[in-house]
């Protein structure tokens, strides 16, 4: 059988900022040799999680082709995005659609909502002007829970933040994408609307076969809608695997820190499957190995000098941590190799 080509892929991608004329030698590694792929056979919802500064937004812009990697390759259907011709790039831009954090920033306040919806239809020649274009717009709005009669003809300021964000989901849907890249799509809407927007993403995944890369700092929503998760720390993968295993039984000390920081109504009850002991971080020291060593409560001497491999702590879970050095090492650098291949995305809230 011929080798299956991933739909979207990062191969040892790094992105380094800085080193300009005024700040020679001062650089920031935003993404550090990340290998990750999205299978073409089955649509999934995958979370990219981490705190601010972990490299999530840089990863999003790399996947969209907005910026070029310092090293490595970003590929779509086996083609390097950086060397695509105009026709291939147009197809890539149509099939990989973004939904960003701030829904208001995407709108021109001088244009009605209709403008942002007709633009992709005209740009990608998705329908003839007139009734067919109108029908596509109405179907997209209804798919995300908006009534066309209450939405079209209005200006952005006349709609709520939740409505504006759902319009951006509808805009992405108009392009008939294969992948939607949602960067913190619910962080600027109130709690009552988060469930509606997240349900829209799930519906697009299940009913229309669209894969979703969900970039977030919020593990609760990642647990609610995602199937797999990649946890980033300072541009490197700390842990990855099936979302239920990673959240319920986190292995990497950084993931444990993230999970333990989630607020719960009753402090006497934990929502993880195990107790996470409180431990003091080590004294400040420069690490040439694991990036989390200066904050890690379980740091060992070897952590300061050597980068850990991806150790398979379970069938669908890997952690880049020497605590599991007796476990098998992931055969390839692609963390997606441990993602479950036959499970259904989780629905519902956190237990």
Image (spheres, helix red, strand yellow):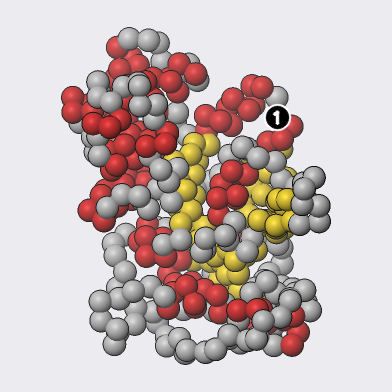
Q: Position of residue 259 (x, y in %)?
A: 44, 74
Left or right of 267, for residue 243: right
Apparent side of residue 199 relative to residue 327 in the rendered image (left or right):
left
Residue plotted at (63% across, 44% down):
62
Give coordinates of residue 65: x percent, y percent: 63, 37
Quadrant assignment, res 68: top right
Q: Nearer the viewer, residue 50 or 231?
A: 50
Between 166 and 85, which is closer to the camera in this rendering?
166
Q: Is 188 situated above or below 317?
A: above
Residue 81: x and y in percent read 68, 36
Q: Residue at x 57, y 60 (%)?
A: 53
- How many callouts does the rendering have? 1
Q: Residues within 10 Å of mark 1 (few under 14, many from 20)?
A: some
Q: Position of residue 150 (x, y in %)?
A: 18, 28
Q: Secondary structure at mark 1?
A: loop
Residue 338 visible within the image: no
Image quadrant where one finds the C terminus: bottom left
Residue 82 in sight here: yes
Q: Residue at x 49, y 44 (%)?
A: 181
What residue is shown with label 1?
84
Residue at 63% across, 64% down? 234
> Height in image: 134 above or below 92?
above
| Picture quadrant of residue 90 | top right
């Amino acid at each position: 059988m011929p080798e299956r080509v991933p739909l979207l892929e990062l191969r040892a991608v790094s992105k380094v900022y800085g080193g300009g004329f005024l700040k020679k030698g001062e650089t920031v590694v935003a993404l550090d040799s990340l290998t990750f792929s999205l299978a073409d056979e089955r649509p999934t919802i995958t979370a990219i999680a981490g705190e601010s500064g972990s490299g999530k937004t840089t990863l999003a812009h790399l996947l969209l082709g907005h910026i070029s990697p310092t090293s490595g390759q970003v590929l779509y259907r086996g083609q390097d995005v950086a060397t695509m011709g105009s026709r291939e790039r147009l197809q890539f831009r149509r099939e990989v659609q973004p939904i960003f954090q701030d829904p208001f920033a995407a709108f021109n306040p001088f244009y009605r909502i209709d403008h942002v919806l007709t633009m992709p239809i005209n740009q990608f020649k998705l329908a003839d002007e007139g009734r067919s274009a109108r029908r596509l717009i109405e179907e997209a709005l209804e798919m995300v829970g908006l009534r066309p009669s209450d939405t079209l003809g209005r200006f952005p300021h006349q709609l709520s933040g939740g409505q504006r964000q759902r319009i951006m989901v509808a805009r992405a849907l108009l392009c008939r994408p294969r992948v939607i890249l949602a960067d913190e799509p619910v962080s600027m809407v109130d709690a009552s609307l988060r469930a509606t927007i997240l349900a829209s993403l799930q519906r697009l995944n299940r009913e229309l076969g669209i894969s979703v890369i969900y970039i977030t700092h919020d593990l609760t929503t990642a647990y609610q809608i995602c199937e797999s998760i990649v946890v980033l720390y300072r541009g490197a993968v700390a842990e990855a695997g099936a979302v239920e295993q990673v959240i319920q039984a986190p292995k990497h000390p950084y993931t444990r820190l993230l999970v333990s920081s989630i607020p719960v109504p009753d402090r006497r009850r934990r929502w993880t499957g195990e107790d996470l002991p409180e431990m003091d971080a080590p004294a400040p020291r420069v690490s040439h190995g694991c990036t989390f060593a200066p904050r890690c409560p379980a740091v060992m001497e070897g952590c300061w000098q050597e980068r850990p491999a991806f150790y398979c702590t379970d069938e669908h879970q890997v952690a880049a941590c020497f605590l599991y050095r007796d476990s098998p090492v992931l055969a390839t650098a692609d963390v997606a190799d441990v993602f479950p291949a036959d499970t259904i995305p989780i629905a519902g809230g956190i237990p």
